[in-house]
Image (cartoon, helix red, strand yellow):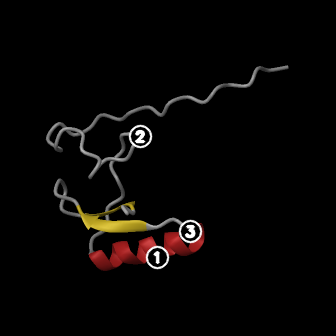
Amino acid sequence: MAKARRGRKPVRRARDPDAGGGTREHWRADGAPKSQYGSADEANRYALQVRLEDGVDLDPYTCSICGHWHLGNRRH
């Protein structure tokens, strides 16, 4: 019988060296850039969709690195 594989850590992708030195504002935990939205309205619509489908509350914010809108975990 084959041995079960243990989970692997995600491979970190190279970050843009001009992107603010590793801030989570623009980068996901796995090292990939966060999804970008062109407007607050578009980000809010997607955040609502995620809340209704998955029950996850996300807050839209403007990224100081790329200037687009991203979604992040709601801070209390």
Horizontal side, residue 5 vs residue 56: left or right: right
Quadrant in which the C terminus appears: bottom left
Measure the alpha-carbon separation of dots 3 and 1: 9 Å
- The amino acid at mark 3 is Gly
- The amino acid at mark 1 is Leu
Q: Is mark 2 on a helix, strand or loop?
A: loop
Q: Residues within 10 Å of mark 1 (few under 14, many from 20)?
A: some
Give the x, y percent position of residue 55: 56, 68
**Which residue carries the number 2 mark?**
30
Residue at 39% x, 63% y: name it.
74
Residue at 48% x, 34% y: name it.
10
Q: How crowded is mark 2: few (under 14 residues within 10 Å), some or many (20 or more)?
A: few
Q: How crowded is mark 3: few (under 14 residues within 10 Å), some or many (20 or more)?
A: few
Outermost residue on the left side: it is 18
Measure the alpha-carbon separation of dots 1 and 2: 24 Å
Q: Closer to the N terminus: mark 2 or mark 3?
A: 2
User: From the viewer's perspective, is the residue at label 2 or at label 3 nearer?
Assistant: 3
Residue 37, compared with residue 28, is above or below; it is below
Judge by depth and name the residue closer to the eye, 58 or 15: 58
Residue 1, compared with residue 63, is above or below; it is above
- The amino acid at mark 2 is Asp
Q: Is mark 3 on a helix, strand or loop?
A: loop
**Which residue carries the number 1 mark?**
48
State how many labels appear: 3
Measure the alpha-carbon separation of dots 2 and 3: 22 Å
**Which residue carries the number 3 mark?**
55
Give the x, y percent position of residue 62: 22, 65
Residue 56, compared with residue 15, is above or below; it is below
Quadrant in which the N terminus appears: top right
